[in-house]
Image (cartoon, rainbow, N blue to C red):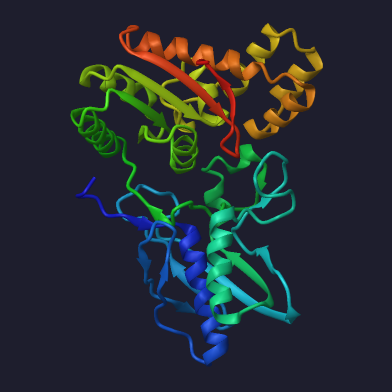
Amino acid sequence: MADLREGFTTGSCAAAAALACCLWQRDGTCPSQVSLRVPAGKVYTPVIIPHADGSCGVIKDSGDDPDITNGMEVIAKIELLEGNGPIIFCAGEGVGTVTETGLKIPVGEPAINLVPRQMIEEAVRSVCGDRAIKVTVSVPGGKEVAKKTFNPRLGIVDGISILGTSGVVRPMSDEALRESLYVELKMRISQGWKNIVFTFGNQGEEAMKRLFPNSCIVQISNEVGFMLDSALELGAEHILLGGHPGKLSKVAAGVMQTHSKYGDARLEAIITHLARLKAPVELIESVYACKTTDAAMKLIHEAGYYEVWNLMAYAAQKYCSLRVRCEINIDIVYLDAQGNIIGKTME
C-alpha cells in the first residue's frame, strides 16, 4: 500500500475546522491553515475556508481511497456560551441525527462518532479552555450523499456521519488492500508465527491484544475468506478469529467478505441460533426487527440467551474450517463493544 496516498477522515476535518473557528474568535483573523495531531499520530495541516458567518470549512481529502465523501466541505461553527461547561454538539446541514437505539451515540444526538467528538473537544479546549461551547458541524450535500451509505438502515436521518477512529483514511481498494494484507501475513509467518490472531479493525486489535497478549495479531478488514485462503497457502497452523457480532455473525452464516456491499446475514444467523435454543417467538421477532447488531445484543442479553454466542462461534468455526479444508485449526471469539468475550469455541 506504500504507493497509495492516505487521506484524513471527516472527524479530522471537523476538528481542524473547529480549531480554526476558535483561533479566529480569539485572534480576530481566520488562520489560513491549522495543524493538529490525529489519533494515528500524523499531523494534519489543512487549508481553512472562512465563511461570512464566522464558520470555517475544510475540504475532505480521502487520498487514494474511493471514499464517497471525498471532496466535500466539512464546516464547523463555534458558539461561546456563558461560563464554564460542557461542549454541546449539534448537527448542521448534511450531518445526520441518530433516531434508533443500539448505536454508541444516543437517540437525538448528531451522528458525530465518539473519536471525532474527542478530537473536536481537544482542539476546542486547547484554545478556549473550560468554556461552555456549542459546536455545529455541517456538510453541504451530505443529506443526498447519505442515501448512498448505510445510514438509512441504521436509523441515521438527514445526513452523513462524522467518522474515524484513527483520523486517517487508509486506501481500501480491494486489490490494494488484499495485497497489503497478504504481505503482512506472509511476513509474520516467515518470522516464525504459525499461530495467528485475525481481527477486523483497530478496536478488535486492541481488545485481542489485551485478551491474548504476546500473540501475533493481523487485521483482515472484511477479507475473511481471502485471508483464510492466504493462511492456508502460507502454512499457518492455527487461526484465532475474534471480533464483534456485527462482523462475526455474517461469518456464522458462511459470508466470507463482510463488507455491507457484498451481503448481510447477521440477523438471520442470530435468530437461527436463538431458535436452536428454543427462544420465544416474540424475542426472535424482536431481534429480527432490530436495525443494528448492538440493539439485537441488548435484547438477547436482557432475555438471558447468552449461550447464543457460543453457538454462533461454533457455526463460524465450521464455515472457516471448511474454507481451509480443515487443514488449519480454527477458533472463534465473539467480543462485545467493551472487548469482553461473550462467545468462544475454546476452553
Does residue 144 appear in this view? Answer: yes
Residue shown at 30%/38% (left/top)?
177
Q: Residue at 47%, 65% (x, y): give it.
A: 13
Q: Quadrant of the N terminus?
A: top left
Above or below, 110 against 87 in this view is above
On the rendered structure, is 295 left or right of 69? Answer: right
Q: Quadrant of residue 303?
A: top right
Residue 286's spot in the image, x, y percent?
Answer: 76, 24
Q: Residue at x 69, y 39 (%)?
A: 102
User: Is residue 185 shown above or below 313?
Assistant: below
Q: Position of residue 85 (x, y in %)?
A: 73, 74
Q: Is residue 264 visible?
A: no
> So how many labels did they put on this image?
0
Is residue 219 placed above or below 266 in the rendered structure?
below
Q: Position of residue 39 (x, y in %)?
A: 44, 58
**Among the 4 quarters of the image, the one containing residue 124:** bottom right
36 or 75: which is nearer to us?
36
Q: Nearer the viewer, residue 97 or 297?
A: 297
Please give left or right for residue 195 compared with residue 115 in the image.
left
182 sits left or right of 49 in the view:
left
* View extreme (front): residue: 214
Vertically, is 1 above or below 214? below
Q: Residue at x 50, y 78 (%)?
A: 20
> In the rendered view, does 239 fall on the left or right side of 121?
left
Where is residue 247? Give x, y as percent.
51, 29
